[in-house]
Image (cartoon, helix red, strand yellow):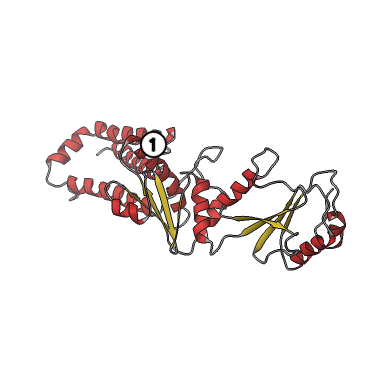
Amino acid sequence: MSRLGSVLLFIGLLFLVAWFVAMRAMSGTLLPFVWVLLAIGLGCFFGAIAKDIRFFVDLAGQRTTKHGVNLGVLVIIVLAILVMVNFISYKHIKKFDYTKEGLHSLSDQTKSIVKSLDSDLEVRGFFGENQQEASERNRFKDLSDLYISQSSKVHVQFINPVKSPEKAKEFDINSSGVVSIEYKGRKAKLDELTEQSFTNAIIKVSRDKNKVIYFVTGHGERDISSGEPTELQNFKKALTDSSYDVKTLSFTEKQQVPDDASVVVIAGPKTAYFEPEIKALNDYLYKGGKLLLALDPGTKNKFGAACSRRWHRFQK
């Protein structure tokens, strides 16, 4: 075989292996350069054959080459290399996101949550076989592969609820296109096939118990139950979707912050708080509690004096 033919064959095989790795790494998110790898690889490979066609014809016609390497053995070696690369890339999925907006990457928060898992997270996607369900399945597979790339604790399997009705019944699945996750015996379902929904479900099953956020009422604060633009119903929904328990706190009933409070929120009070209420908040903060103040400008309150004494710096 000529020197040029050998070089072309080597480069061709190198580019074909690179193309194969890129296909596995990008899993459905293929950019033009991937096809460039394939084109160069095939071009060099067939270029080597064209350059030394007589060599390959003679090689195919001989039982062995003068170096004792059978053509079939050569093919098997190349296939073995590709199978090995396939196995390694499957076991060690690494995805690359070349979009400026990071469209095919997970947020830093999600990465941190997934990497903190200390037990197996079982993810079961229930999808049928029609065109729409297959499309949803592929979309969720691309998303779940990103989670798998962050932790070996994440295990994903896809189940056809029609072919496996007993599995669907076991996980209370009544329709196709539903994803169920399980962690340490706790189960949850995804509301949507999105990163936010997936991560929220992980938070829900990985917490021993949900954190509780109290919104203080009684002084004209923003209403967490009202859908008006100036109220906080959407904020409450965002918190509950992130697996927080949201409750209201009225000091008229008991002038003390409950022990299970993770955060107390005072959002836009219209009238001043009374001294016993300020004392209750102070007592809560002394114990290491967290308070979020959201005050409208121009409203009268007693938080300025309280903040100057014991709370964080007060910004008017």
Which image quarter: residue 312? bottom right
Q: Nearer the viewer, residue 217 or 52?
A: 217
Residue found at x 42% / y 44%: 140
**Foreground residue among 172 and 220:** 220
Instruction: Tell me what residue is drawn at x 43 percent, y 61 percent.
Output: 120
Would residue 295 be seen by someone viewing this image from the given angle? Answer: yes
In this rendering, does residue 153 appear at all? no
Q: Residue furthest front?
A: 253
Q: Residues within 10 Å of mark 1 (few under 14, many from 20)?
A: many
Residue 309, percent across and down?
Answer: 86, 62
Residue 263: x percent and y percent? 68, 58
Residue 51, percent from left and from top: 26, 32
- x 55%, y 48%: residue: 107
What is the total number of numbered labels drawn onto the structure image? 1
Question: Residue 163: where, in percent of width, then height?
Answer: 26, 48
The residue nearer to you, when weighing 136 against 278, is 278
Given residues 114 and 26, the one toward you in this image is: 114
- Residue that numbered label 1 is attached to: 37
* Residue lying farthest to the bottom in this orientation: 287
- SS label for mark 1: helix
Q: Is residue 281 left or right of residue 99?
A: right
Q: What kind of residue is marked 1?
A: Leu
Task: Name the quarter where the N terminus is drawn.
Answer: top left
